[in-house]
């Protein structure tokens, strides 16, 4: 119930295309859903995040779509660029309690954007 | 701000040796996290501290792993004795306060145990 399932494991997109990464969760008590971006040799960095009371959040070319009833959320990268090539992790935050603030991460999606 | 600092960046050691990884969180941050990243298991939380106190160490794989935070600006993760299956990238992250939305990750330590 604490897992976050992410797909696909890897994704190849042409420059200018749309990249879509999906995540699903079970625990309805999760209260925050961030996406992290990780470049090779670097640590993950927060890209964009959404709360469960919002269905969509957009920041530039990056959009999170959130479906509370289906317990799914996805990251859309519009006009994908070679510089977007990285590994993307979805995550969910445990609610307040014994381990407040802990993030449960998906296993990651390696995105390659071909020029 | 220098961000989260980790050392060493790379560590190669032989099975059975003690390994100590170090982390300096962002100044003023009260929460510190240690993660392990492998291809098979992804990013796993090992332990986290709040105000230098360990809050949740349920992710620590076994007694060979230990972590300390003697003060607000320094933490260590120790593996003794190390085993080949400990080979992974270990990340330290910090956040301004317990339950904060964002965690700031360091560059990681790549550990190889032969």
Image (cartoon, grey):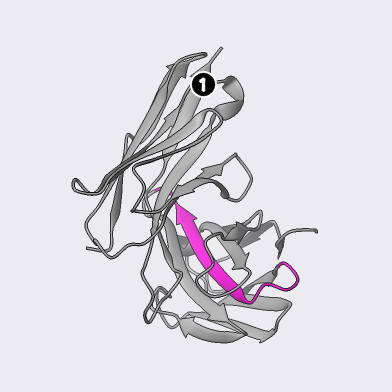
Q: Residue at x 52, y 14 (%)?
A: A15
Q: Is residue A64 magenta?
A: no
Dividing the picture into quadrants, the one containing residue A17 is top left
Give percent across and percent down for residue A58. 48, 35
Q: Residue at x 54, y 34 (%)?
A: A86
Q: Residues within 10 Å of mark 1 (few under 14, many from 20)?
A: many
Label 1 marks a residue whose chain is A
Please name the residue that numbered disc 1 is placed on: A80
User: In this picture, is A84 found above or below A70?
Assistant: above
Judge from the rendering whether residue A107 lies leftward or rightward of residue B101; answer left or right: left
Tell me, yes or no, if residue B18 can be seen here. no
B112 and A39: which is toward the camera: A39
Give percent across and percent down for residue A69. 19, 48
B28 and A50: which is toward the camera: A50
B23 and A84: which is toward the camera: A84
Dividing the picture into quadrants, the one containing residue A96 is bottom left
User: In this picture, is A45 found above or below A83?
Assistant: below
Mark 1 residue element: loop
Give percent across and percent down for residue A29. 28, 65
Q: Residue furthest left?
A: A69
Q: Is residue B35 magenta?
A: yes
Dividing the picture into quadrants, the one containing residue B9 is bottom right
The magenta segment is B26-39
Q: Residue at x 72, y 67 (%)?
A: B26
Tell me, yes or no, if residue A3 can be seen here. yes
């Amino acid at each position: 119930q604490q897992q976050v399932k992410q797909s696909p494991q890897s994704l190849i997109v042409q420059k200018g295309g749309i990249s879509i990464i999906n995540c699903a969760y079970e625990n309805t008590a999760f209260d925050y859903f961030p996406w992290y971006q990780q470049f090779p040799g670097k640590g993950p960095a927060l890209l964009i995040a959404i709360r469960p009371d919002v269905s969509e959040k957009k920041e530039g070319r990056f959009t999170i779509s959130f479906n509370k009833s289906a317990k799914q959320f996805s990251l859309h990268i519009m006009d994908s660029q070679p510089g977007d090539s990285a590994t993307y992790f979805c995550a969910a935050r445990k609610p307040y309690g014994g381990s407040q603030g802990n993030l449960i991460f998906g296993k990651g999606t390696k995105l390659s954007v071909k020029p | 701000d220098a961000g989260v600092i980790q050392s060493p960046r790379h560590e190669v050691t032989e099975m059975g040796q003690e390994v100590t990884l170090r982390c300096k969180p962002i100044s003023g941050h009260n929460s510190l996290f240690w993660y392990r990243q492998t291809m098979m298991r992804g990013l796993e939380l090992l332990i986290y501290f709040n105000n230098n106190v360990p809050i949740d160490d349920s992710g620590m794989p076994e007694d060979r792993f230990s972590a300390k935070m003697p003060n607000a600006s320094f933490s260590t993760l120790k593996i003794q004795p190390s085993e080949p299956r400990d080979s992974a990238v270990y990340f330290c992250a910090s956040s301004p306060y317990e339950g904060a939305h964002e965690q700031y990750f360091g560059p990681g330590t790549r550990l190889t145990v032969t």
